[in-house]
Amino acid sequence: MGACGGENEAGSNGGNADDGKITMGFAQVGAESGWRTANTKSIQEAAAAAGIDLKFSDAQQKQENQIKAIRSYIAQKVDVIAFSPVVESGWDTVLKEAKDAKIPVILTDRAVDSKDTSLYKTFIGSDFVLEGKKAGEWLVKEYQGKTDTVNIVELQGTTGSAPANDRKAGFGDVIKADPKFKVIASQTGDFTRAKGKEVMEAFLKANPKIDVLYAHNDDMGLGAIEAIEAAGKKPGVDIKIITVDAVKDGMTALAAGKINFIVECSPLLGPQLMDLAKKVVKGETVEQRVLTEETTFTPEQAKAALPDRKY
Ligand code: AHR
């Protein structure tokens, strides 16, 4: 497993709430983006505020590390396990192990594709399909009344992850209604700035006419901006850019006109997660799906929102 909180090794004072304090094992995806950093901070701060003892692990974007972390939390008999699954599939076995050990599981941020929904108590996070649709709707409006082909390149998130699958699907669903929109290249940038830059460089070399970049997160969009500028083009003008997240760096680029539109995805899941954890540990029934509220931003809206942006 990746960087584990020092006190959080297997065999330390486990949970099942006998000392009255809830112990949560949280298996984080990694530290791939500004969004993830803000999400980790929100979870750690909310746990401290709620008096929950948090055991935290960073899987460095690897499913096997997350599975190891979850098994270690089961061995430690924590009261509740929460995790943000790096990819959608392949969780049934470990989730069944948690269920057999009578440890409730909460999914945060990303979904799993398990058919057996009794393997987890609830799922808190965004509607990624809707986020993709919002990106597509902005594009349709932007090119309303125009007939020329619009060449789009897409930087996908981590292959097999719920946000990559769903943001692609939602966007595709909206733009398919108009044949002038053509996705001429689509590749993963793994939600990182470095990979976003690298893949955009390749897109630019292979495609002389790119009108639009749709990046599944701000970080990949920001990496791509570096590649676009290095190629002597103006991001936001020569190539229109749509991203998802609305973290501070993304909003700053949006306010500067280098990004044209951002669909918000809120990382501030900590407080709601701790409330849900308290309820499931008490055995209370909770909603199977808790949706995060989100908006969208134009450059003007980004300028207005930036002074109060917390992440
Ligand atoms: O699962 C949420 C996504 O993961 C965010 O949009 C992205 O920035 C992060 O890496």
Image (cartoon, rainbow, N blue to C red):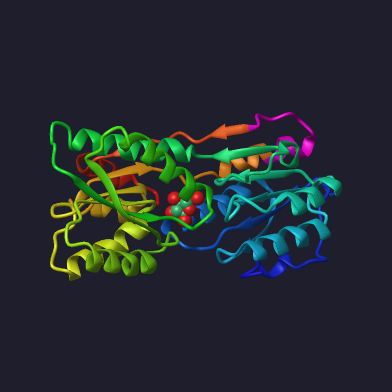
* Residue at 48%, 47% in the rendered image: 165
Whether the magenta-drawn stretch holds residue 210 is answered as: no
Taking 172 as reference, is 104 left or right?
Answer: right
Whether the magenta-drawn stretch holds residue 283 is answered as: yes
* Residue at 50%, 57% in the rendered image: 159
Foreground of the two, 244 or 48: 244
Q: Look at the picture and state if 212 lies above or below 75.
A: above
Range drawn in magenta: 277-288
Count up the numbered dots: 0
Q: Position of residue 305 (x, y in %)?
A: 29, 42
The answer to whether residue 192 is visible is yes
Foreground of the two, 218 or 267: 218
| Displayed quadrant of residue 185 | bottom left
* Residue at 72%, 45% in the rendered image: 105
Q: Position of residue 43 (x, y in %)?
A: 57, 51
Foreground of the two, 282 or 265: 265
Q: Position of residue 9 (x, y in %)?
A: 75, 68
Taking 132 as reference, is 120 left or right?
Answer: right
Taking 308 as reference, is 236 left or right?
Answer: left
Residue at the extreme front: 179
Taking 48 as reference, is 203 left or right?
Answer: left
| Displayed quadrant of residue 121 | top right
The answer to whether residue 35 is visible is no
Q: Which part of the image, by quadrant, shows the N terminus?
A: bottom right
